[in-house]
């Protein structure tokens, strides 16, 4: 939550009074003077003290194993949404998915009501890696691995950043691969393979930044982030 918004809400200050607290050096984060009113804070990660008074936040952070057929949205007229998989009593009104997965793509999705965190994670400058397991309808070759490492060029000239493609297994008619990218272009993974003349037949995200999809989390299930997982996201609180 933005620090200035938190101060206004919990100390019931006016904007003028809130600014005076910063100018009078009465805002401390982790016992250090803080002058940035827009700083994203969470009391699970930060010690927040204003004029000697501790402040608390109430953000939620969920890891969801998104199943196929569910759309990455808050509302949809036709399909069940990712946020609707969260039970109503655990679902704040502004809960939303960070980033997007296609309707037929499964796997790790972060849901939160901390909009600043979601924004920071999706910024190109953050270079947050996303890792996918994919099944491809043909043999993936060493030439494909090299092309991904150089940067795939879409039809139309759009150039992707270099990506790490690992071949896990190759059969007569398909391959299993692991792909790590730092971008989030529309249908990016599928388009990258199409540019190599191959089609993705199954796709699942297994990691996003420091977060990993827990093997025990079944499709459609979710859980709150552990303290360790949340700590690993602290660098994105800006």
Image (cartoon, rainbow, N blue to C red):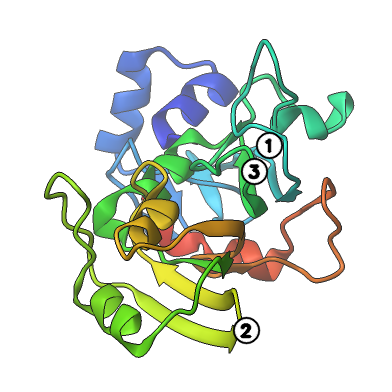
Percent from the top left, x then y, of residue 192? 34, 59
Which residue is rendered at x = 87% and y = 68% of the image? 216
Q: Is residue 136 above or below residue 58?
A: below
Does the image show residue 107? yes
For label 3, the residue is 104
Query: Residue at the left extreme?
Result: 157
Percent from the top left, x then y, of residue 142? 35, 89
Spatial CA distance of label 2 from label 3 is 23 Å
Q: Is residue 227 left or right of residue 38?
A: right
Which residue is rendered at x = 50% and y = 72% of the image? 138
Spatial CA distance of label 1 from label 3 is 32 Å
For label 1, the residue is 58
Dot 1: what SS? loop
Which residue is rendered at x = 37% and y = 24% of the image? 18
Choose the circle earlier in sequence order: 1 or 2.
1
In front of the other: label 1 or label 3?
3
Q: Is residue 66 above or below residue 140?
A: above
In front of the other: label 2 or label 3?
2
Percent from the top left, x then y, of residue 146? 26, 84
Spatial CA distance of label 1 from label 2 is 49 Å
Which residue is rendered at x = 46% and y = 72% of the image? 179
Q: Is residue 160 above or below residue 26?
A: below
Q: Is residue 22 above or below residue 45?
A: above
Percent from the top left, x then y, of residue 73? 59, 27
Choose the circle earlier in sequence order: 1 or 3.
1
- Mark 3: give few (<14), some (14-19) or many (20+) Cα within 10 Å: some
For label 2, the residue is 171
């Amino acid at each position: 939550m933005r620090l200035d918004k938190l101060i206004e809400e919990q100390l019931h200050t006016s904007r003028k009074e809130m600014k005076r607290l910063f100018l009078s050096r009465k805002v401390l984060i982790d016992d250090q003077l803080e002058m940035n009113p827009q700083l994203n804070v969470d009391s699970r990660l930060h010690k927040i003290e204003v004029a000697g008074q501790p402040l608390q936040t109430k953000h939620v952070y969920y890891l969801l194993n998104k199943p196929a057929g569910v759309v990455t949205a808050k509302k949809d007229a036709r399909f069940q949404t990712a946020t609707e998989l969260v039970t109503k009593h655990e679902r704040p009104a502004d809960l939303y998915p960070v980033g997007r997965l296609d309707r037929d793509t499964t796997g790790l999705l972060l849901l939160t009501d901390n909009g600043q965190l979601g924004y920071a994670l999706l910024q190109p400058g953050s270079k947050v890696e996303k890792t996918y397991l994919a099944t491809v309808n043909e043999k993936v070759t060493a030439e494909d691995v090299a092309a991904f490492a150089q940067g795939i060029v879409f039809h139309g000239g759009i150039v992707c950043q270099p990506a790490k493609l690992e071949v896990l297994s190759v059969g007569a008619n398909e391959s299993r691969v692991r792909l790590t990218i730092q971008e989030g272009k529309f249908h990016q993974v599928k388009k990258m393979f199409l540019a190599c003349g191959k089609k993705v037949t199954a796709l699942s995200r297994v990691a996003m930044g420091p977060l990993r999809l827990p093997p025990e989390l079944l499709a459609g299930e979710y859980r709150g982030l552990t303290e360790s997982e949340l700590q690993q996201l602290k660098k994105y609180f800006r």
